[in-house]
Amino acid sequence: MKPCWILLFSCPDAPGIQAFVSTFIHTHGGFIDDVKAHSDQESGQFVCRISFQAAGETSLDIETFKKDLEREGKPFEMNWSITSADEKLPTVIAVSKFGHCLNDLLHRWRIGSLPIDIRAIVSNHDTMRPMAEFYGIPYHHIPVTKQTKMESEARFLDVVNEAGGELVVLARYMQILSDGLSAKWSGRCINIHHSFLPSFKGAKPYHQAFQRGVKLIGATAHYVTSDLDEGPIIEQDVERIDHSQTPKLLVEQGSDIEARVLSRAVKWHASRRIVMIGQRTIVLR
């Protein structure tokens, strides 16, 4: 099969942008097979994701393509990236004692439905080691206490750097990252949590929700920032519940929602479908 490339860009909205990019790809020997675009009225930004490959029997020099786009795209003030559609994003997953999100990600990775390359698993507990060993993924047990938090974060950072991780996924990792680490991983660290925040904080949120007669449960996947659980939202989902469901059933239902919401967020990030505008995300599905 021919190499396929993904161009993801944003720029101030103006007439002629799509015409310029389409013509540019054509004149460099490319054939467009998919386009997703959005004109954001709030910010005045135009965002676009284009998948393309060499047209016909021609070849496409991607390095020349990049150099020419850097020069010719300047009048449009384009912020862009080009990646191979076959590239698997190097990923490190962090987890604590709840393995439903980790198990879902590992399964989807194994069957090829997530465009990621899981390089390592980090945990502040040893609970998930058997799962990591089953999938053949290096497992790093890094205990965290109040006294050792900064040292533990330094070891976590070392694992990510040594693994070449370009994406960090907090798959129910029950530790708060420091402001410094959150800033270092800005735009490449994804977290998942239940949707009851900020109403039901702390232990047993599903039990708290049951006691209050909540009628909807859900989950939120977002980029990590120094504002706890308030980073740019990537994906959310909800399901209706009623009085007949026990707290145990709510936990099970909530775990399923968390797993699928996180997997969508990871897939869209790794597929280069997300553009951040301020504190919002544009997901070009």
Image (spheres, helix red, strand yellow):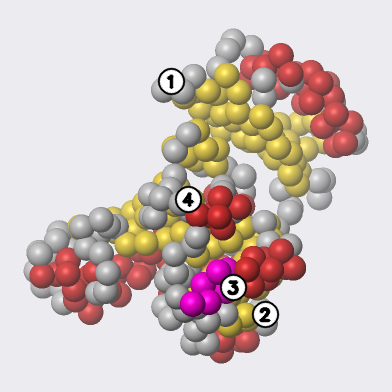
Residue position marked by numbered label 3 in the rendering? 151
User: Which amino acid type is shown beneath numbered disc 4?
Assistant: Thr
User: Which amino acid type is shown beneath numbered disc 3?
Assistant: Glu
- In the image, residue 241 sits, relative to residue 96, either above or below, namely above
**Label 4 packing within 10 angstroms: few (<14), some (14-19), many (20+):** many
- The first of marks 1 and 2 along the sequence is 1
Residue 33 visible in the displayed image? no
Q: Of helix, strand and loop, which one carries label 1? A: loop
User: Which amino acid type is shown beneath numbered disc 2?
Assistant: Pro
Q: Of helix, strand and loop, which one carries label 4? A: loop
User: Which amino acid type is shown beneath numbered disc 1?
Assistant: Gln
**Label 2 packing within 10 angstroms: few (<14), some (14-19), many (20+):** some
CB-based contact (under 8 Å), mark 1 and mark 2: no
Task: Name the foreground residue: 57 vs 191.
Answer: 191
Q: Nearer the viewer, mark 1 or mark 3?
A: 3
Q: Which residues are magenta?
A: 147-153
Q: Of helix, strand and loop, which one carries label 2? A: loop
The location of residue 238, given as percent across then percent down, is 28, 55
Residue position marked by numbered label 2 in the rendering? 138
- The first of marks 4 and 2 along the sequence is 2
Tag shown at residue 225: 4
Residue at point 81%, 21% (across, down): 71
Residue position marked by numbered label 1 in the rendering? 41
- The first of marks 3 and 4 along the sequence is 3
Q: Is residue 240 left or right of residue 226?
A: left
The location of residue 96, given as percent across then percent down, is 46, 77
Whether the magenta-drawn stretch holds residue 241 is answered as no
State the CA–CA distance, disc 3 to disc 4.
20 Å
State the CA–CA distance, disc 4 to disc 2.
27 Å
Q: Nearer the viewer, mark 4 or mark 2?
A: 4
Per the picture, the main secondary structure of the magenta-coloured stretch is helix
